[in-house]
Image (tube, coloured by chain):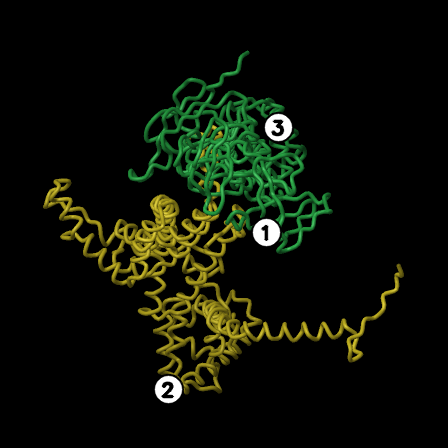
Chain colours: A yellow, B green
Amino acid sequence: MSNETKQILTTDGIPLEISLKKAERKNKIKAFLLVAPLLLFLIITYIFPIGEMFTRSIDDKMITNMLPKTFKSMETWDGKELPSEEVFASFLSDFKILVDKKEHGKLAQRLNKEKNGFNTITKKLFRQVKRDKIDETQSIKEQIMKVHKRWRNVEYWQAIKRTAPPYTSAKYLKAMDMYLNEDNKITQVSEDRRIHRILWLRTVEVAFFVTVFCFLMGYPIAHLLATLPMKYSNLLMICVLLPFWTSLLVRTASWMILLQQQGVVNDFFVIIGLVSDDNRPEMMYNKVGTYVAMTQILLPFMVLPLYSVMKTISPSLMRAGKSLGGTPFIAFWKVYFPLTIPGIGAGCLLVFILAIGYYITPALVGGASGTLISNQIAYHMKTTLDWSFASAMGLMLLGGVLVIYWLYNKLVGVDNIKLG
Amino acid sequence: MSKNTEFVKFDKVDKSYDGKVLVVKDLNLNISEGEFITMLGPSGSGKTTCLMMLAGFETPTNGEIYLDSNPISNIPPHKRGIGMVFQNYALFPHMTVYENLAFPLRVRKVQKDEIDKKVDKALSMVSLSGFESRMPAQLSGGQQQRVAVARALVFDPAVVLMDEPLGALDKNLRESMQYEIKHIHENIGVTVVYVTHDQGEALTMSNRIAVFNDGKVQQLSSPDKLYEEPVNSFVAEFIGENNTFGGEVTDISKNVCKVKLQNGEILANPISVNSKGDKTTVSIRPERALINPKDKMDNNQTGKIEEVIYHGDHTRLRLDLLGNKEFILKVPNSSNELDLKLGNEIKVGWNSQDARALDPK
């Protein structure tokens, strides 16, 4: 056998290797073109908005662009005593431009967020500027300091300097009930104002228990579905899916009808004598309502992956377990259960991730003690219009989900997930 | 020690799933200790149901099953101590080979070193030593099959049930596994109840074969008897190849009877006919009919060759003989002096003892 490999040529004299590569390249381009629309769609609807959310959540450029000269001259200021004449002068020049563009109000608002009291003194300064009372041939520093005593307070100038960086982590800290104090240290807000941390914890707690309830209820249903003869299992499957096909709003509303104090469930309890008529328990506008409604709504997401996994488990495995001497429980625990873990993983992950971002149901049946972090996000989106804060919280939620996914991958392995 | 001939006993067992149709009817079957018995039959004949009743996954509607003289109908499967090899092996896919084999021992709380020993022994028995840490999915079909056999034997059960264990294997592997299972049985002397619809498998492996049809045992006998002396036309038809003639008995004596066919008359061995006028199906094995017989045979007929099929070691002829156009003859390929051409007329003869007059179809 010779070791020389002769170059194989095609009939038109081109080396076969090159010709094959050419053909393959064509196929690759074709394949790419086929997926390109989806890729584009994903970039536009998923990656781009997330990036946009991220920049919005840390963006603090507005004020940076409002006071360019001030921040420039502040670079050399040590921040311990009142800044120099030059800083005052550039601040005034920036401020005049803002007054011309009628944007001084925005500045006052932004600075007031950083430190209370800016509103008043900016308004005063505005009036002085409007009346052209500031003589630029004199010391600007002296004149501004005369406008209001706070302009003589170094803390206010420090506050201005703190807003200099174009990016800020303030929104993230706020979502954790923390803020940066005067010394640039992370500080907790006073105890009576800590609302977000409670919401985060409650969200995780609700998502966790909803997942547990869904698992406890979904596992037997899925097992029944997988083992019943076809004609019954189809019917049962429709029963599982029927709520799935009903509008989320309709389902939540029907839970409201069932759970309210004069509702069907309470009426039933009174009729069978479980509770007295004047002592009906509150099952709505609290956590109970959230748990009940969310568990029911998310149940199919647990049942379906479990079912699809269980369907593939041959009934002869359980029989083998029993014939080899295992009690029905041992056969279940050692043989059947381990084989359903991929389905359990998929179902739990799915339900937990959906539950952690749930919005409509807690908003409608949750009341004050049953609302979750997503309701807070919606509140900031729609009511306070603080989109950057909403973005920050949204991203934290996304980050949390990614962490869970990573943990799951470490513990069980994502390859083990089976959705069907 | 004398062997218990009623080690497993089906006593008047009926089974119905829907309360309307009996899938097993009045089954009486005794299985001796250490016997290899095969339940053979077409699908739906009740053989698997019998096996499932013995394993404990189905309960008899009527009657009782005894294992070593103890009624077992009310004993759950895990307490019966019966090993079982399933059709699709039913190896636990999430356990290694070792863990699969250790499962029946672990649930019996056997000591760890004892488990190791027994697993070793069972694996070497099926020549799979060294495969302990493999997962079932990493094994070939034949290897999985052997693990399944080893697992059913590792806890020394009194009886091992096998439900078409070789069904999923290809032909060559199936044949070698047949011998392997047979040898394992001979070596350890366990009682085996084997279910199959493959008659070749049944004939090569078993001590006795129970042919099932329509929920009943049609015949229970050793493989050679089953083939040579079928008691009814179903068994004759089901086991091996078979030439049949339908006719009516015109004369009967102790050893021979005359059967009138549509066009002709033959002599046959009266098995299930008693008197003149009985309808009958006469069954002759293809290899029992000879061309140009040199010995004197009491049936001599002429047939026309309709088809010649070359089979390597022999040639099959399809004849038109006495109105039966499906009469098969097997001719060894050594006798090539014969002129076997399509359309030729040849002489065919057989002994009346080999032509069994059975019940009519």
Residue underneath mark 1: B304
Residue underneath mark 2: A130
The type of residue carrying mark 1 is: Lys
Q: For residue A181, which quarter of the picture?
A: bottom left
Residues at marks 2 and 1 touching, judged by CB atoms closer than 8 Å: no
The type of residue carrying mark 2 is: Lys
Residue underneath mark 3: B184
Distance from Cα at disc 1 to Cα at disc 3: 48 Å
Density class for disc 2 (Cα within 10 Å; few <14, some 14-19, many ≥20) is few
- Is A108 rendered above or below residue B217? below
Q: Which residue is pictured at 65% across the width and 36% down the height? A: B131
Do the residues indicated by labels 1 and 3 lie within the same chain of the protein?
A: yes
| Residue B221, x across and y down, in percent | 51, 28
Q: Chain of mark 1?
A: B
Which one is in front, A114 or B172? B172
Q: Which residue is pictured at 49% across the width and 51% down the height? A: A417
Q: Chain of mark 2?
A: A
